[in-house]
Image: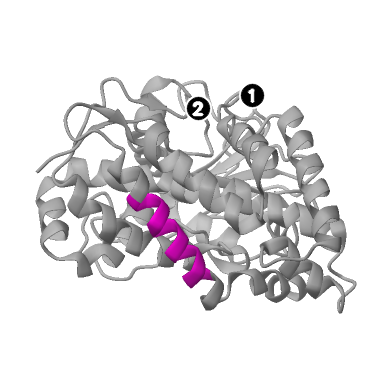
Amino acid sequence: MNPIEPIAHPRDQVVLDDAFFDDPYPTYRRKRESGPVFYDPDQGLWMAFSYAAVRQALFDYEVFSSARGNTIRDSPQRVGKTLGSMDPPQHDALRPIIMRGFTASRIAVAVEDLLADAAQRLGELPRTGPFDFVGDFSRPLLYSCLGRMLGLEGTQAGLAAAILGNLFKGADGPYGLPLPEEDMRTLFGLLQDQLAYRRNHPSDDLFSVLLEAQSTDDRLTDDIILGNLSTVLLAGNASIGHFFPNIFLALHQHPDQARRVLEDMSLVPALIEESVRWDTSTQCFARQVTRDVILDGVKVPASSRIVLFYGSASRDERSIPEAERFDIDRGKVQHFGFGAGTHHCLGALAAKRMLAPLLQQILPELGMFDLDLGTADRVKHIMVRGFKHLPMTVGT
């Protein structure tokens, strides 16, 4: 069978309207059925929706390169300076060094602080009437957690929170940068100041850990430290900031499974795993095609920019049985909620280790909560699935 070279007609293109942002999965399903790999001339992008296509790309970094950045239109301040915008061998040499900031002992301390902070914030939430789960709880909890990890205090912590508050608002359009360029410059300036300060005043934060590593390894340049710590902020927002509320949406939509989790907190790790497969906050990433390649039966030419839809691939029933169904009893399957291959999410293990005890602490307090999806406000960006505001009422 000869490969085909499809170009999207207007009726085939992904329409980024409110219906898509509310629920992109019907669109993904149609694309998997009608043309799982195609070219959108309006955007100048190839798009891959099937499990087979996404898996092939993620496990072949030589053909599907991250060296031009991994967001659809990446920031020049990040390209070549983060693990996500590097290919092996540079990526493989630096990843273990960056991982020194995420040891089991450091995560344990972060969890202890996170739970104490969450307990205090839970106590301040109303027990009757609605509150904004994102604005009143998960977002400030996230900002405090990330600030502690990076050793940000006072005005620096406030500025970082303000920048993150703009994160993924789609200021440059739904295909644009996840964070506006002006905010990226401000963020890097803040991190540069913190790097200079920690060089002379070391502590136990991530800056200090990487500066200590830099003293014995000159591959870890200042630009790489700054690039990867900016990723901690940006990716951290996608975990607690966006993925965390998505778990509550899944529970709200599946009350029978919510009751089971409330009755048996040992199911929480399975809840996290199935939630990140079923409704990941990271919906897609991009790659640069280095040479002509056949992807799920379609010829994709060299020099193409291609978007890999993780959210669609993880619901492809040709590879995962009953993939459209949310099932905490599913067991382990290979999905792409945290990516896969060389660039599997650096913080995936840390996120799971932090989210599990956090959920086990707060779920009994929230009970069979209710969500007002009619007044919820969605993030409107193709790369990210989450909420700006999510009204919740505590249950029993």
Residue 330 or residue 32, whichever sits in front: 330
* Residue 113 forms part of the magenta stretch: yes
Residue bearing the label numbered 1: 42
Q: Residue at x 69, y 43 (%)?
A: 305
Q: Residue at x 36, y 48 (%)?
A: 120
**Amino acid type of disc 1?**
Asp
In the image, residue 303 above or below residue 210: above
In the image, residue 41 above or below residue 306: above
User: Alpha-carbon neighbours of circle 2 within 10 Å: few (<14), some, or many (≥20)?
Assistant: some
Query: Could you say where residue 27 lies in the image, as x and y percent from the top left?
Result: 38, 34
- Which secondary structure dominates the residues rendered in magenta? helix
Quarter holding residue 160: top right
By what rule are the colours in the image chosen?
A: one colour
Q: Where does the magenta region start and end? A: 107-119
Total number of numbered labels?
2
Residue bearing the label numbered 2: 13
* Residue 357 forms part of the magenta stretch: no
Instruction: Check disc 2 and report its element: helix, strand or loop.
Output: loop
Q: Are marks 1 and 2 in contact (CB under 8 Å)?
A: yes
Instruction: Check disc 1 and report its element: helix, strand or loop.
Output: loop
State left or right for residue 4 relative to residue 195: left
